[in-house]
Amino acid sequence: MKEIKIKSDTINLDQFLKWANLVMSGGEAKHLIQAGEVEVNGEIELKRGKTLKVGDIVSLTAEDNKYKVSRG
């Protein structure tokens, strides 16, 4: 599991995907989320504005890697 450090206490899911370099643009993040290809804490998340907090785990259904939100 890879830890992704954020500078605030929370971050929106679409912003996190960009911050973690999992997508190249907000449009790509929107597409992945709406297609049901992003999981937060093991559950598919369809809202790109979902607020993530430290400790949440994000993964893409197409890969095995998991990304933990951490404070940095």
Image (spheres, rainbow, N blue to C red):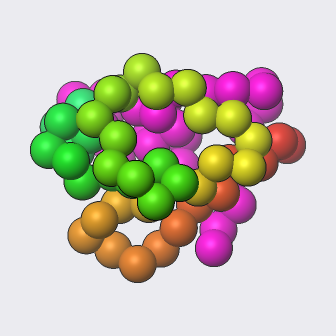
Q: Residue at x 24, y 53 (%)?
A: 37
Residue 28, can we see it?
no
Viewed as shown, does residue 25 lie left or right of 20? left
Q: Is residue 66 magenta?
A: no
The residue sitting at 47% across, 34% down in the picture is 13
Q: Is residue 58 above or below residue 25?
A: below
| Residue depicted at 28% across the width and 35% down the height | 46
Residue at image location 33% in from the left, 74% down from the top: 63
Among all residues in the image, which is located at the extreme right? 72
Q: Quadrant of residue 32?
A: top left
Task: Locate the N terminus and report the quarter of the image it occupies.
Answer: bottom right
Q: Residue 57: horizontal and vertical position, in percent?
A: 58, 55
Residue 54 appears in the rendering: yes
In the displayed structure, would residue 31 be above or below residue 55? Answer: above
Which sits in the foreground, 35 or 6? 35
Q: Is residue 15 left or right of residue 57?
A: left
Q: Nearer the viewer, residue 2 or 25?
A: 2
**Is 3 above or below relative to 8?**
below
Stretch in magenta: 1-29
Q: Is residue 1 toward the left or the right of residue 58 in the image? A: right
Asked if residue 7 lies in the magenta stretch, the reply is yes
